[in-house]
């Protein structure tokens, strides 16, 4: 069974962060299983799922990453996955949906929308937000990927969104994730 | 010369369904204003009447100045446009003057057969493709209060615009998503 470790790192954005982290992982014989990295304003955030070679322990990996963390001023955290977690197939049997919400920026949009999803047992797997200007008005846009437990949850969430649209004065569109079939 | 301000979201007219407009002086004025406003914005390849405050079903499209244009009909004025046939769906990146800072990947037909009237009320039937077909669909959506953000199908398909230039419609081939789909 693979030894999987989740790694998060965040720090002031600068050239070379990814390369420096990847170099250490390469030299220690780790594989990048999954990753998501993005810049948030002036910070750069890294999320990695890495598999470790049998011979490499967590403490040794931590020590190896310390140098990069210092040089690049990164806050690095590691979390080993249990065997059960490593073998799991999250999202199996659920329905994949995308939700897009946009409207004039005001506090509470993310909270109200995500709480409505949580109340119904819908699981968020990806969420991105943007604050942009639309003329002189600040516009908040939110794009979310969700795993829905079943069609009845989709229906209930759709109904809840209709009331949230009016209450929050936003637009909201919920659609099944489209997979191109070639 | 009647360049009108382009409405930006959350102006309520952008979410309303536009109505028919009789052939005559009002329509001529709307099309003239659409044309002047389109020409006023460098890189702008299409505008719909609701974007400049007219709740009518007409659009102007001209992709001929774009390097991505391909085969096209030049300057088009379309009154009451209807899609008769739409095929070859692909993802492409779009922007909109009504959302100056956002871009999104949207799936559009690359081949289109449309019916419309011209400014004199004569029936037109056109076959369009590529960028022109995409521009027409984007503008026609405005007539039904559908904005390009309403067509996003993945959280990864929404982007902030990096450059200040704001053409009404930009289509960039997205390497990740530019797949020919077998169904719309």
Image (spheres, coloured by chain):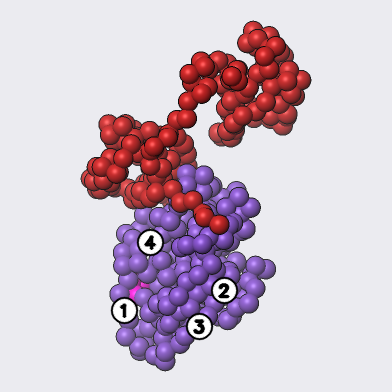
Which residue is disc 2 drawn over? Answer: B129
**Magenta highlight range:** B52-56
Q: Is residue B80 above or below residue B94?
A: below
Quadrant in which the C terminus of chain A appears? bottom right
Assess disc 1: are there few (<14), some (14-19) or many (≥20) residues with their C-alpha within 10 Å of its C-alpha. few
Question: Pointer 4 indicates a residue of which chain?
Answer: B
How far separated are the C-alphas under marks 4 and 2? 21 Å
Q: Quadrant of the N terminus of chain A?
A: top right
Disc on the earlier residue, 1 or 2: 1
Looking at the image, tell me whether mark 1 or mark 3 is earlier in sequence order. 1
Q: CA distance from mark 1 to mark 2?
A: 26 Å
Residue furthest to the front in view is: A1
Same chain letter for marks 1 and 3: yes
The structure residue drawn at horizontal position 31% and vertical position 79%, both measured from the top left corner, is B20
Marks 4, 3: nearer the viewer: 3
CB under 8 Å between callouts 2 and 3?
Answer: no
The residue indicated by pointer 1 is B20
Image vertical order of residue B46 relative to residue B106, above or below: below
C-beta proximity under 8 Å, tags 1 and 3: no
The x, y position of residue A60, in whole percent, is 68, 9
Question: Does residue A39 appear left or right of residue A143 in this picture?
Answer: right
Q: In the picture, which chain is purple? A: B
Q: Earlier in the sequence, mark 4 or mark 3?
A: 3
Please name the color used to draw chain A: red
Same-subunit check for callouts 1 and 4: yes
Tell me if residue B54 is in the magenta stretch: yes
């Amino acid at each position: 069974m693979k030894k999987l470790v989740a790694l998060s790192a965040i720090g002031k954005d600068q050239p070379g962060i990814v390369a420096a982290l990847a170099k250490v992982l390469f030299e220690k014989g780790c594989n990048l299983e999954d990753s998501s990295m993005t810049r948030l304003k002036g910070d750069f955030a890294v999320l990695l799922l890495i598999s470790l070679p049998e011979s490499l322990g967590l403490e040794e990996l931590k020590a190896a990453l310390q140098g990069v963390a210092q040089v690049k001023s990164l806050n690095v955290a590691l979390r080993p996955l249990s065997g059960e977690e490593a073998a799991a197939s999250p999202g199996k049997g659920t329905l994949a949906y995308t939700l897009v919400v946009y409207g004039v920026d005001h506090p509470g949009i993310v909270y109200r929308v995500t709480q409505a999803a949580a109340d119904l047992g819908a699981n968020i797997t990806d969420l991105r937000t943007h604050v942009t200007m639309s003329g002189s008005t600040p516009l908040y846009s939110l794009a979310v990927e969700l795993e829905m437990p079943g069609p009845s949850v989709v229906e209930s969430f759709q109904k809840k969104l209709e009331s949230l649209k009016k209450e929050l004065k936003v637009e909201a569109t919920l659609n099944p994730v489209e997979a191109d079939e070639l | 010369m009647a360049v009108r301000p382009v409405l930006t979201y959350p102006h309520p007219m952008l979410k309303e369904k536009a109505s028919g407009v009789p052939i005559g002086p009002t329509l001529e004025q709307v099309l003239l204003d659409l044309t002047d406003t389109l020409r006023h914005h460098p890189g702008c390849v299409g505008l719909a009447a609701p974007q400049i405050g007219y709740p009518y079903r007409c659009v102007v499209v001209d992709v001929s100045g774009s390097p991505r244009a391909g085969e096209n009909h030049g300057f088009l004025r379309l009154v009451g446009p209807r899609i008769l046939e739409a095929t070859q769906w692909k993802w492409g990146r779009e922007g909109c003057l009504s959302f100056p800072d956002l871009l999104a990947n949207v799936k559009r037909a690359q081949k289109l057969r449309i019916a419309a009237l011209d400014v004199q009320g004569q029936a037109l039937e056109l076959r369009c493709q590529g960028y022109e077909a995409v521009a027409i669909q984007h503008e026609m959506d405005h007539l039904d209060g559908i904005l390009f953000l309403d067509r996003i199908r993945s959280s990864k398909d929404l982007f902030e615009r990096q450059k200040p230039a704001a053409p009404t419609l930009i289509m960039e081939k997205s390497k990740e998503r530019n797949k020919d789909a077998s169904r719309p």
